Structure formats: C-alpha cells, structure tokens
Amino acid sequence: MEASRKWSDVHKMHDSLTPAQREKWPWHAWLWAYYVVSTRVFGCKYQMCVVPLADNYNTADDIRMNTNWEFSKISNNFIIKATKDIKKGDEIFTKYGQHDNRHYLAHYGFVMPTNNEDMLTFRFSVDEGKLKSVKAQTRSKYNFCQFTSGFLFCSVKRKDIKGMYNNMINIAKKGQSEKRAATAIQEQADFYAKEHDGSTIRTFKKSGLEASSSERMDIIERFQRGYLHSAQEVKKLAAKTLEKYAEDGDSELR
C-alpha cells in the first residue's frame, strides 16, 4: 500500500542524514517535522512551497468544493479563486489534488467520506506472442493501464467504475482470453472485498479498546466502506461478463 511505501521513503530520508544531523533530529523529531511540512505544501513552479494562510484550508468532495488554486509562473504568485458564490461564514475548501483515500490516509491522516478517486488495481498475465498488442494498448494516457515487470496492471476509479472496467477488460483480453481476464478480475475484486469488509474493525471492537480510539475507528470504517463499494461493483461487472460463458456451455470465447 502507498502508506507502507511512504513510511519506507521517510525512513530512507532519515537514514541518509549525517550522524550529527541524526543526533539533532532523532527519528520521532524528524517524523514530526517531515509531516508538519509535507501535509501543508503546495506545488509551486519546480518545487514545493509553504503558503501561509492557504495551508489552513480543508479539502472536500466535489459538491462542497468552492475554490481552486494555481501558481502563476508569470507573476510568481500563489492564487486561490472562488469557483462558486461563497457566503459570509461559509467554510472555504480547496483541492489537495486528485487523490484516493490511500493517499489521504498516508499523507494527511484522514479520508474523504465519499471519494470518487478511490482506485483499485488489477494484475493480468499476458500470453506469449501477445506482448506487442498489449503494450500498444497501454500507450494511451487515458486508459489507466500499464505493462511492467511482465504483467499488465489496470486501475478502476470509483467515479467511473463501469467505463473503466470495460476499458480494463478490453485491454486485458488482448493478452489472454476474455473469460480468463474476467475470472482474474473477479478473484482479485473478491480479495479486495474481503480485505475491506470490516472484519479488522469488528475484531478490534471485541477487544474493548475502541472506546479510546473512536475517531480512528471512524476513519478506518470510512476508508474501508469506500473500497468495499468499488470491489463489490467490479465483482458484479465481472460476473456479468462471465454469464455468457456459462450460457454457452463454458466455452472459451476469444
């Protein structure tokens, strides 16, 4: 998961410090300083920058979002523009970027109640002799598929599950049969569903420890609900794809 990769990256940065620097910035102090900065910076020109006041704004879903920001390379100014009328007393929300809840949890420690950027990634094997065809299909920046380490990886976002599923199955069947591709999707979606079915939370609650961590439990529950929804929808679409093979006597259509 991204959270694990991020944690590893932060460790590597701390390990790269000189002994004198590590003495001045022991691990917990370094971690605090890193996240104080990384959760507040914006992308300015060719580097990250801290923008006083702007880092106080929260983010929200598309419905409540009422501003957008940009960095002007011409005037060298950071600009926040209202995207709709904002009444006196209304909270100002701005975009943190197009991120799924894994990113928000790893970088900011919160999740969006409903996040259309939530993304599930699926892996497919590619039959010999079909590599060229599959690689050609992954060159478009719009299909959310890439070929790496001998496998095809495709992603599905919550905001367009059906459309991105259709794109994924169409590319995956370039490297193997459609039936095998749909079966692989169904199996992996089932894994995602079990991973986010709330069993971890139920086990934790049985221990009687959740009372002191209710806010954390709410965050985890929102996180899991979003990915569970996406996994269940993908499972339905894969099952529908496989129906025609059951009706056709389980033949391997291509």
Image (spheres, rainbow, N blue to C red):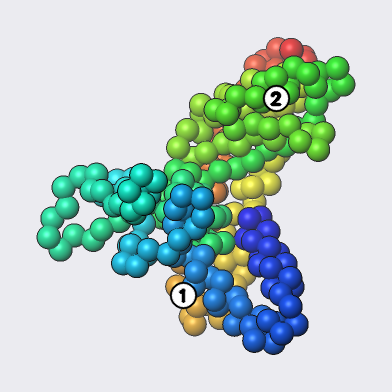
Of callouts 2 and 1, the N-terminal one? 2
Quadrant (top left/top right/bottom left/bottom right) for the C terminus: top right
Q: Is residue 169 left or right of residue 40?
A: right
What residue did someone put label 1 on? 214
Which element is circle 2 on?
Answer: helix
Q: Label 1 is placed on what type of residue?
A: Ser
Measuring from the top left, give residue 208's x and y in whole percent: 56, 80
* Tag of residue 172: 2
Q: Given this view, does label 2 or label 1 mark the residue nearer the observer?
A: 2
Q: Looking at the image, which residue is at 50% across and 78% down? A: 213
Q: Is residue 219 at all visible to an observer of this figure?
A: no
Q: Could you say which quadrant of the image residue 253 lies in?
A: top right
Distance from disc 2 to disc 1, alpha carbons, whole Å, reads 42 Å
Q: Is residue 201 visible?
A: yes
Asked which quadrant contains residue 200, the reply is bottom right
Give the residue type that dot 2 points to. Answer: Ala
Q: In which quadrant of the rendered image does the N terminus lie?
A: bottom right
The residue sitting at the left extreme is 88
Q: Residue at x 51, y 29 (%)?
A: 162
